[in-house]
Image: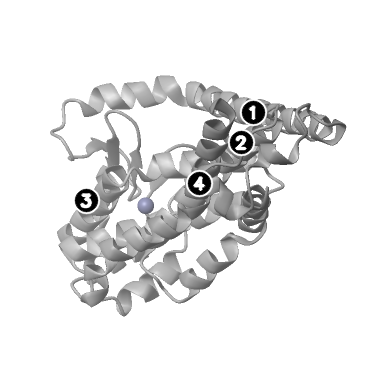
Amino acid sequence: MIGMLAVLLAGTAVGLHGHRPLLWLAERRVDPTILLVGWSLLSIGLVASTLAMIGLLALPMDEHEASGLFQLVGGCWTAVTTGTVPAWQQTVAGISLIMAATILVRLGKAITSRLRSVRRHAPHVEQLRLLAMSSSAGEPLWVPGRRAMALSIGGRPGVIIASDGLRAHLPPEAVAATLEHERAHLRGHHHALVTVAETLAAALPWCPLLGAAPAAIRDLVELAADDQAARRCGPEAVQVALRRMTGQPVPPFGLAMASRLTELRISRLATSDPQGARHLLRWPGAAAMAAGTLLLPAATTWLGINVVLCAVT
Ligand SMILES: [Zn+2]
């Protein structure tokens, strides 16, 4: 029981305040890839853990002896019962079922509305995908247009669209940096990260962590893509591209090069060292962040295993 209450409290704290440490780390310019791992795993882990915890609360339990690791946290939850399910437990189970159904229905609605929006743009996107098949992998589909424009569309296969205006108005190294930025979005599955965050936020808008995630992830994918472009083409080339492309129209789908935070990104690149020590700390940092953010799902899984083991033994 103590273990279950502790995980419930931890889940509530993560839902209400989990975004604060991530925003604090962002202000201290922690690597965007590390923060993307944090936002994504914390959000998905919170929703999965919440559903699992509610499911555990709804389980009708009979009397069982405490066993295994569960005993360490105060004895088996079922041991507090007296052989029949008491009224308070029935109430908890009823409330849990209503909460689980509400969350699942809202998730279903959010996913349906997302699919509807994808379908609305599907004919144009499919046309672009077909046209892009003539280009070699990673190369953009060049489309007519006087304005400098570049964007990527996620999915299989991912597509990069660039306008002729990009080549006309930007020097070759800035064009290369722009395309590298868009390739980084596709390699990093940034479109999927944004989609998942937006869907979870639409389904559960009252959760502060999930509510803050879409904007944070949209900003972080731009910073992460800038970093990768800067590492391959140099920070100056990315800066030039951002300066020249500021004000480009934001497409209704895909991720555009200069749609967000352009001033901040330009000033950040001025002091960045793409080959520096921070780059070497990226993957150990991401692994540490993943371990930290997966603590809640891990604790929930551990509780679930113990409850199930307890119920079947
Ligand atoms: Zn971008």
Residue 297 is labelled as 4
Q: Residues within 10 Å of mark 4 (few under 14, many from 20)?
A: many
**Nearer the camera: disc 2 or disc 3:** 2
**Residue at label 2?**
51
**Residue at label 3?**
167
Q: In the picture shown, does residue 187 fall above or below 269?
A: above
**Nearer the camera: disc 4 or disc 1:** 4
Task: Residue at 31% x, 61% y: name it.
Answer: 226
Q: Residue type at mark 4: give it.
A: Pro
Q: Secondary structure at mark 1?
A: helix
Q: Residue type at mark 1: give it.
A: Leu
Q: Residue type at mark 3: give it.
A: Arg
Would residue 145 appear left or right of 38 to someone viewing this image? Answer: left
Q: Which residue occupies the foreground of this view, 113 or 11?
A: 11
**Nearer the camera: disc 4 or disc 3:** 4
Q: Secondary structure at mark 2?
A: helix
Q: Disc 2 and disc 3: Cα gap in Å?
A: 50 Å
